[in-house]
Amino acid sequence: MSGRSRNHQGWPLLAHSFRPFFLLAALQAAASILVWLPAFYGELSLTSAFAPRDWHVHEMLYGFLPAVITGFLFTAIPNWTGRLPIQGTPLAALVIVWLAGRIAVTLSAETGWLFALLIDASFLALVVAAAAREIIAGRNWRNLPVVLMISVLLAGNVAFHLEAHLAGSADISIRIGISVVVLLLSLIGGRIIPSFTRNWLVKMNPGRLPIPFGRFDGVVIGLSALTLLAWIASPLSAATGVAMVLAGGLHLVRLARWAGDRTSRERLLLILHVGYAFVPVGFLLHALAAFGVLPPSAGIHAWMTGAAGTMTLAVMTRASLGHTGQTLTASIATHVIYAAIIIAGATRVCAVLVPAHSDAALHVAAFAWITAYLGFAVAFGPLLLGLRFRALATVRPATVAR
């Protein structure tokens, strides 16, 4: 069923959720790293109650990514349910709460950790409530697991504040949040990547087609969930290492089933496959960490900088074009954005794998990350702000995912 649409007479930025949240997420992703690097080297003091590392992790895991997830989710839900999109004043309220959370966390040394917790957690609580209402009202039970995962992300955010305050630093709550992100990438990626790939191949490159989401994918996601639970509880145990090897291998098989090797001519598709490749890499790096070969941060950055960083940009660029009536073609600027985020993911992992060159790799990764996300804000900002909105007002939005 196609999502319903309606004319929006107000500010174009509030016409669809992807517009404000993709733009603000990109700006926050770039700004956070601009602040984090000097803070990491002791050149800048933060006003957050969190330790510098925890502030960095929190703003990536529970600040930046929830904004992207919200932009995607409330753009996709009308297509899933056939209900009207959230826009205008309700959307503006969500944006304001998200912004308030970023300010509250950053200034929590002055305002207090409990105040920051209440403001920050309010955003995901509202997202869960609104998404559940829409999915239940639309009787779209198939996508209810997405809401359940975001509920766990909300719980992880609350736990992060509590753990950081009571223990001095966050640990378990970081693994909870990362696990939810990996599962969301596995679930949503497993639906949209083969679907988008099939649609393009049928028209542009007939031949071998990707295998759509099915029982095998469900088994892989289920095993991944169990593996991540083991990782949350005991990240360095031998049992967790064995499970990580199995999960990583199955994700590689899953990726190979999607015919990504046949999409080299369409960069908007190829980047999805490249981004997803970091998921099995992350599992395998965590296996090596469990066996004492590598530091655990290698796998964490493969998942977060590599998989999450790349796939969010892939979805943000594609959805921004498709839902504003543009041609689904990667421009020169989009190619630069994609190249930068791949470099960021690879070099951030290398900073862990090659300690002798970690400082240089860290700076390259930070520069590439900022280039990718600030590049998105510059290249796609005018489109998201609606500078071409009126000319495209009658264009029916494209489907994000079914």
Image (cartoon, rainbow, N blue to C red):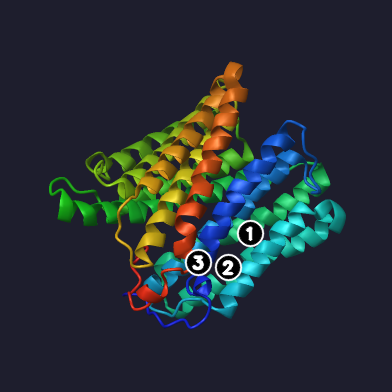
Going by the picture, which residue comes out furthest to the top?
356
Q: What element carries label 3?
A: loop
Q: Which of marks 1 and 2 is nearer the N terminus?
A: 2
Q: Mark 1 points at which residue?
A: 154
Which image quadrant is residue 191 in? bottom left
Quarter the N terminus occupies: bottom left
Q: Are marks 3 and 1 in contact (CB under 8 Å)?
A: no
Direction from residue 164 to residue 86 in the image, left or right:
left
Q: Can residue 99 be seen in this view?
A: yes
Q: Are marks 1 and 2 in contact (CB under 8 Å)?
A: yes
User: Which disc is residue 385 wearing?
Assistant: 3
Q: Mark 2 points at which residue?
A: 128
Alpha carbon distance from label 3 to label 2: 26 Å
Alpha carbon distance from label 1 to label 2: 8 Å
User: Could you tell me the amino acid type at mark 3?
Assistant: Leu
Q: Earlier in the sequence, mark 3 or mark 1?
A: 1
Question: How many C-alpha atoms fall within 10 Å of the one at disc 3: few (<14), some, or many (≥20)?
Answer: some
Q: Residue at x 69, y 66 (%)?
A: 122
User: Could you tell me the amino acid type at mark 2?
Assistant: Val
Q: Which residue is drawn at 60% across and 73% down?
A: 92
Q: Which residue is drawn at 33% across and 75% down?
A: 396
- Which is nearer the eye, 58 or 131? 58
User: Could you tell me the amino acid type at mark 1?
Assistant: Leu
